[in-house]
Image (cartoon, grey):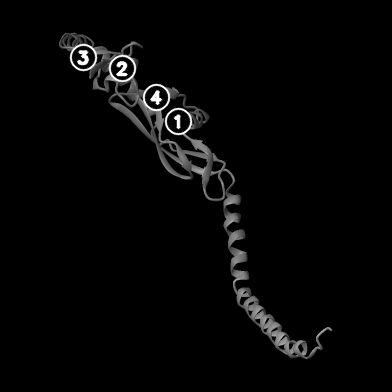
Amino acid sequence: MELILKEDIIGLGYKNDIVKVKDGYGRNYLIPTGKAVIASAMAKKVLAENLKQQAHKLAVLKQNAEEKAKAFEGVALEIAAKVSSTGQLYGSVGAAQVVAALAEKGIEVDRKIVTMREAKQIGEYEATVHFHKEVEVKIPVTVVAENPEDIEKAPKKEAAPVAEEAPAVEEVAEEVVEAAAEVVEEAVEEAPAAEEAPAAE
């Protein structure tokens, strides 16, 4: 179904956008909560007229968004998180951590307009700040280990014993073979003695 959004919904569209959604999502959530209305022919006509009248206001909103976006020029974030020895994060890093990291740099931004694919391991990511339908800012985010020493030590501890124990396998095999040979020899020597023993009367 086609709907006209009455407010910004990140991931779907911005206020006054005409969007297509599944019937259930529209009828059970967007329309009842007042976030959208059905995009009938009359509603589209009213929207076009309103946008025409609000053109100046919309231009001002866009200009304000561009001004806010300037504060993010050259901004890159490095977020430290606790990591396991395999490089996996305990938990994850997402939009909430990005907003907190920006606040530490003196940049305040609403959590609702920030999106980022949640980071589950260390590496390079990208967060997006949605100021306006035509003004979005991409922020590079590097997730690093808060405890790098644990990652460096873990693989070495596991790898060392394997290299040391490998030669010992052949030695153990030789000892087992020798021991088995001795047991066989003793059994052969004792067999005749058992036959010569007098039977009990």
Q: Hey, what amino acid is under mark 4?
A: Ile
Query: Image quarter for residue 155?
Result: bottom right
Look at the image and tell me in which quarter the C terminus lies: bottom right
In this rendering, position of residue 148 left or right of residue 135? right
Which residue is labeled 4 in the image? Answer: 113
- Badge 3 amino acid: Ala
Q: Which residue is disc 2 drawn over?
A: 61
Q: Residues within 10 Å of mark 3 (few under 14, many from 20)?
A: some
Give the labeled residue for mark 1.
95
Hey, what amino acid is under mark 2?
Leu
Secondary structure of the residue carrying tag 1 is: helix
Pick the front one: 191 or 9 = 191
Q: CA distance from mark 2 to mark 3?
A: 24 Å
Q: Position of residue 62 (x, y in %)?
A: 29, 20
- Alpha-carbon distance for marks 1 and 4? 9 Å
**Label annotation for residue 39:** 3
Residue situated furthest right in the rendering: 201
Q: Are marks 1 and 4 in contact (CB under 8 Å)?
A: no
